[in-house]
Image (tube, rainbow, N blue to C red):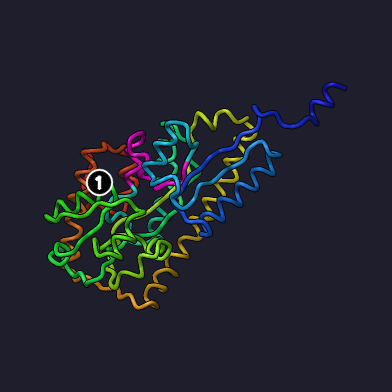
Amino acid sequence: MLAILFCFSPISPIQAKTIKIATISPEGTFWMKQMRAGAKEIKEKTQGRVKFKFYPGGVMGNDSNVLRKIHIGQLHGGAVTVGTLYQSTPDTTIYGLPFLFSNLDDAEEIRKTTDKLLNGRIESNGFVNFGFAQGGFTYLMSKEPVNSFDDLRKQKSWVPEKNDVGLSVYRRINATPISLPLSDVLTGLQTGLINTVITSPIGALALQWHTHVNYVVDFPLTYLAAMMVIDKKVFSKLSEVDQAIVREVMTKVYKNIDDQNKIDNNAAREALINQGVKFVKLDDKEKSEWIKAGDFVINEMIEKYKYNKALYNAVMVNRPDAPKIH
C-alpha cells in the first residue's frame, strides 16, 4: 500500500526543476515560439518534473551578461550566439570566421560533419547543447553606399562589444569602429552616432535596424549560428529519463529553427528589397580585397584561439585557398 501511495504522491521539490533560460530573441519571434512549444512538451512528458522559464528580449542583458549570470547561478542557461562560449570552448568562434561558406546549401552540407565535432567540444567543457540554428549570413548595411574599403573608412561603423572578428577587420583596413551593446544600436542609428552595421537580413528586420539603412553590400561576410546551452552541473541533476526527454525535444526544436531560418533568410532579403533597400554588388577587384582582409582575420583568430585542427579543416573543406593550421 505504501508503494502505491508513493507512486501517486505529488512531485517533491527535489525532483522538480525549473530551468531559467535568457535570450536576446524578442518575444513573438519564431525562435521564442518554438522554444516555448518545446518547453510545454517537456513539461507534459516529464509530468511537470522539468519546466522552463524564459527571459526573452535581452532583459537579462547581452550574451556575455547571460553567460556571467549562468556562472554565478542566477540563470541556468541561455539561447546565445555560438561564439559566446569562446572562453571555455575557443572552437565556438570558428563559425564566425569570414567567408567560410559560399551559400546556405554549402553551409548545410559542411555542418553535417562539423556540428557534431563542435558540439562534442562544447559538452566536454561544461555545457549541454541541443544543436545549432543558423541565423544566415551577415551583410554590411549602411545609410550611404559603400563600394570599397575607402568608402567604409568614411562611415561611422558599429561593431558588437568584444567582437574579435569585427575589430580585426577594422584594424586591417585602418578604420576605427564604434563599439556598442546590441541594445544601444537602434538608438545609435536614430541619433546618427553610427550609420553602418553588420547583421543578417532577419536580424535587421527583427531589431528594426532596417528602417535606418538604405544600402546593403551584396557580399555575405560571416555565418551566424545560435544555440541553447544549459550548465552541465544543472542538467546532471535531472534524472536520466528527464535528461533524455529534454535532449530529444530541444534537439528537435533547434532543428526546426535551423530549417525555418534558411527559408526566412531568403524571405527577409526580399522584404528588405521591397522596402526600398538597395543591394549593391562589389566588383571583382574589391571582392578580392575583402577576401584578403578576411584571410588576415582568420590568421589572427587561428593564432588567438588555437583551433582544433580536425574541426578547422572540416569547416574549410571547400576553401583550399584558406589559411592553414600547421
The stretch drawn in magenta includes residue 87:
yes
Q: Is residue 112 visible?
A: no
Query: Residue 206: x, y in percent?
Result: 43, 62
Q: Residue at x 14, y 56 (%)?
A: 175
Q: Quadrant of residue 13?
A: top right
Magenta-highlighted residues:
78-94
Residue farthest to the front? 191
The stretch drawn in magenta includes residue 138:
no
Question: Where is mark 1, residue-wise?
Answer: 164
Query: Residue 244: x, y in percent?
Result: 61, 37
- Of residue 71 and residue 274, the one placed in the foreground of this image is 71
Q: Residue at x 65, y 47 (%)?
A: 41
Q: From the viewer's perspective, is residue 99 above or below residue 238?
A: below
- Of residue 226 and residue 76, the one placed in the foreground of this image is 76
Q: From the viewer's perspective, is residue 275 above or below residue 66?
A: below
Badge 1 local density, few (<14 within 10 Å), some, or many (20+)? Answer: some
- Of residue 203 and residue 91, the one placed in the foreground of this image is 203
Q: Residue at x 31, y 37 (%)?
A: 308
Q: Residue at x 48, y 39 (%)?
A: 77
Query: Residue 268: x, y in percent?
Result: 42, 68
Q: From the viewer's perspective, is residue 49 above or below residue 313?
A: above
Q: Is residue 94 left or right of residue 299?
A: right
Residue farthest to the right? 1
Q: Is residue 248 visible?
A: yes
- Label 1, secondary structure: give it: helix
| Residue type marked 1 | Asp
Q: From the viewer's perspective, is residue 86 above or below residue 258?
A: above
| Rendered-image quadrant of the N terminus | top right
Query: Residue 61: x, y in percent?
Result: 40, 46
